Image (spheres, rainbow, N blue to C red):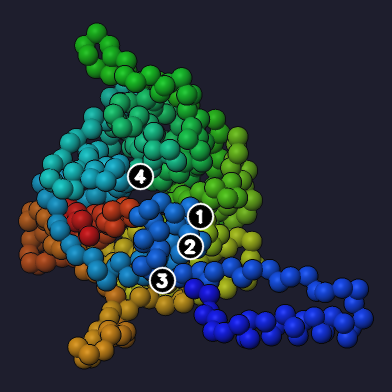
Amino acid sequence: MAPRQTGSRKRKAPALAASSLGSAAGGDGPLPPKKPKRPAALRSLLHYLKGREVGARGRAGLPGFEGKLRGYAVRKLPELLRERELALGTLNKVFASQWLNARQVVCGTKCNTLFVVDVQSGHITRIPLMRDRGPASARAQPNCGIHAIQLNPSKTLLATGGENPNSLAVYQLPTLDPVCLGDRHGHKDWIFAIAWMSDTVAVSGSRDGTVALWKMDPDMFHGSIAWHNDAGLPLYAHIRPRDVETIPRASTNPSNRKVRALAFSGKNQELGAVSLDGYFHLWKAQSNLSRLLSIRLPYCRENVCLTYCDELSLYAVGSQSHVSFLDPRQRQQNIRPLCSREGGTGVRSLSFYQHIVTVGTGHGSLLFYDIRAQTFLEERASASPHFPPGPAGRKLKLTCGRGWLNHDDLWVNYFGGIGELPNALYTHCYNWPEMKLFVAGGPLPSGLHGNYAGLWS
């Protein structure tokens, strides 16, 4: 609101002074009239919400306020989240997950099951896996499963593994009809990671030490119904990769070039890859893949997850005890690694949203790191009911529930029948419009059979 003016004498004084100043300076005439003052911007949350209700133009009449609100919500949401466990029966270890819509999450497990869970009703729908065009002996291998699930940018296609974990399977959304399978001419070992570069181009990374670029023909999925054979089974195309590149051998461990994680930078059209020999690799991703650089990671043990933040142009790599931050364009890395020693169980899942990094550990906990402040979010505690809550000085940590564990002979003989074992959080994904977080995993020891899934909201 403009300041209130009281009295005609005060209104005329500035004009008289300006006229006198113009004459004294030898000007040819009076000064030009002053531009009318713009009304002061209303920067309260109340005015913003009122403006949004009536559909005010220009981002509800308050440019930048929505961004500040999102940033505030990102910091405040974790301490407000509460868990509701979801029962998954006897499925073994959820390795990958993605939201399909406001109430459905698609998941992949170690027991090679692809399913959709309704987070409201808890109902589970299994999705048939695609089979290779080859002998049965080349199909599913034990102790592997589905390690990656990714939706393309327009959420019209879903890429994951097939019945053979070496194969890339693509489904159409929202129907989940099979579209195509990359099998015989692709990877020779399990697919660990998938990243979409566009709506029709995906890259997969494998334990065989290669990354493969796949292009989907739009004609394969423009139809609204899947083809079926005489027996009523769905038919799908079999494709081969457009390009296959091998991870360069490291002098330290040349046999351990397994590609463990991928992350794509849409801004720079570059693909980051992490291999188990302790290296980060950067590829220019266009119609083919061309390697730009390889960097020795500061922490080399169990680098199993990778994520990228477009806003900060920053990669984050999760290892056994740290999260390392990499900007490939900076010789000197300005952001120090963060340590997350949760029982020595390592970082198992990572995600960026704005300036907050969510860390899923092998000890059943979620941590939240503010990349700008370079500190973990802290718990809030109120010393008195008359004062607002302040930092309690302890890291904010969400501890996940018990899940389900198979009490078999292995559990009895090797773990002494321990009543509770924390679940490794192998995957988590946010649904920010609904302010929900889906988290899943299972017991960390490879021989134990169990699962965990929870909705945090």
Q: Tell me, for residue 28, which label it has, or none.
A: none
Q: Amino acid at mark 4?
A: Ala
Residue 307 vs residue 33, the one in the foreground: 33
Q: Quadrant location of residue 350?
A: bottom left
Q: Earlier in the sequence, mark 3 or mark 1?
A: 3
Of helix, strand and loop, which one carries label 2?
Answer: loop
Left or right for 48, reference 378: right
Which residue was labeled with disc 1?
58
The mark total stands at: 4
Q: Earlier in the sequence, mark 2 or mark 4?
A: 2
Q: Amino acid at mark 1?
A: Gly
Residue 46 vs residue 136, the one in the foreground: 46
Q: Nearer the viewer, mark 4 or mark 1?
A: 1
Which residue was labeled with disc 2?
62
Which residue was labeled with disc 4?
148
Which residue was labeled with disc 3?
44
Q: Tell me the CA gap for discs 4 and 1.
A: 40 Å
